[in-house]
Image (tube, grey):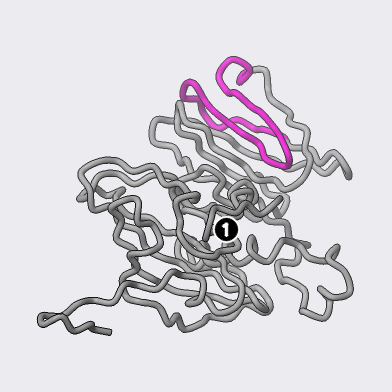
């Protein structure tokens, strides 16, 4: 992935396709494969993604051939049901070692839509130390911006029991304004810092975004102002103000001190022409 400059801003747009969210509107649901069939529900008419993180072949029973659309690419399985059906066994076979993963799929009008990420018992979820990074990037399980963003999203959205610690990631105190107006000046969005985490020389900052307009807003990382390594929205749009969907979270990854990545807030002018801090 290449870094794309936009004047005074730099956003790694390719990060979006690497993250656990992709185009989803919720954080991943983590499911641990322990040789027990995993129950997965689908919402009729909406696609749900299963991140197997392996190249898999899909065993689809004939009973679902006209009911369930199945596609696979890059370790992800895309499922979309066009009508409801009872629990039915689906098989995923690892193309490299032949291991079979069993999924019990069902579809209804009220099924889930957030992506599912399969977790395997033997997987290591910690990142290598800085010394091991110097010995070779091949040992790095994920790029640091991806790992930081994924960790931050899980901290905010995933059930605590599903969040696993990542070696080296530490919370940081953010020295930012309580309200940031210079980050996304092209749209009527209220931006508030929430939390931050650091790994080596990178920091991820989670910011709450709230739409203040009576119209739907499509979020575009190219409109962000500042110097950032990566930017990812938890949702790709904001509904009009006052609706349940008028708020989301933005994850910004910076290198070095995070406060230096933002354009300074304009000084406020007090009565009499004096500038406030």
The magenta segment: 63-91
Residue 244 horizontal side relative to residue 165, left or right: left
Q: Position of residue 133 (x, y in %)?
A: 81, 73
For image coordinates 72% across by 48% down, the residue present is: 53
Q: Position of residue 270 (x, y in %)?
A: 15, 80
Residue 93 horizontal side relative to residue 233, left or right: right
For image coordinates 68% across by 56% down, the residue present is: 119
Residue 58 horizontal side relative to residue 254, left or right: right
For image coordinates 73% across by 71% down, the residue present is: 127
Seen in the picture, residue 220 relative to 129 is either above or below; the reply is above
Seen in the picture, residue 163 relative to 215 is either above or below; the reply is below
The residue nearer to you, when weighing 248 against 63, is: 248
Seen in the picture, residue 98 relative to 11 is either above or below; the reply is above
The residue nearer to you, when weighing 113 against 40, is: 113
Q: How many numbered marks have been drawn onto this rendered protein structure?
A: 1
145 part of magenta stretch: no
Q: Position of residue 30 (x, y in %)?
A: 58, 55
For image coordinates 25% across by 44% down, the residue present is: 240
Q: Position of residue 183 (x, y in %)?
A: 40, 62
Q: Quadrant of residue 12?
A: bottom right
* Secondary structure mainly formed by the magenta segment: strand
The residue singled out by tag 1 in the image is 10
Which quarter of the rendered picture does the C terminus lie within? bottom left
Q: Secondary structure at mark 1?
A: strand
């Amino acid at each position: 992935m290449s870094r794309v400059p936009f004047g005074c801003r730099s956003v790694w747009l390719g990060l979006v396709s690497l993250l656990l969210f992709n185009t989803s509107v919720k954080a991943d649901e983590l499911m641990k494969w322990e040789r027990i069939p995993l129950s997965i529900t689908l919402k009729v008419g909406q696609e749900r993604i299963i991140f197997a993180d392996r190249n898999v072949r899909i065993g689809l029973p004939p009973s679902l051939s006209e009911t369930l659309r199945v596609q696979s690419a890059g370790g992800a399985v895309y499922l979309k049901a066009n009508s409801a059906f009872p629990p039915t066994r689906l098989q995923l076979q690892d193309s490299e070692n032949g291991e079979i993963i069993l999924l019990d799929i069902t579809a209804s009008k009220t099924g889930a839509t957030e992506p599912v990420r399969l977790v395997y018992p033997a997987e290591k979820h910690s990142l290598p130390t800085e010394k091991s990074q110097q010995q070779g990037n091949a040992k790095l399980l994920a790029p640091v911006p991806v790992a930081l963003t994924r960790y931050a999203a899980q901290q905010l959205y995933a059930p605590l029991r599903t969040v696993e610690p990542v070696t080296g990631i530490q919370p940081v105190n953010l020295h930012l304004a309580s309200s940031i107006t210079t980050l996304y000046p092209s749209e009527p969005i209220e931006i508030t810092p929430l939390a931050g985490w650091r790994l080596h020389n990178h920091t991820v900052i989670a910011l709450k975004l709230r739409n203040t307009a009576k119209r739907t807003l499509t979020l575009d990382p190219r409109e962000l102002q500042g110097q950032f390594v990566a930017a990812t929205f938890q949702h790709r749009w904001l509904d009009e103000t006052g609706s349940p969907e008028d708020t989301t979270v933005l994850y910004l990854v910076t290198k070095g001190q995070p406060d230096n990545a933002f354009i300074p807030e304009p000084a406020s002018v007090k009565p009499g022409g004096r500038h406030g801090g």
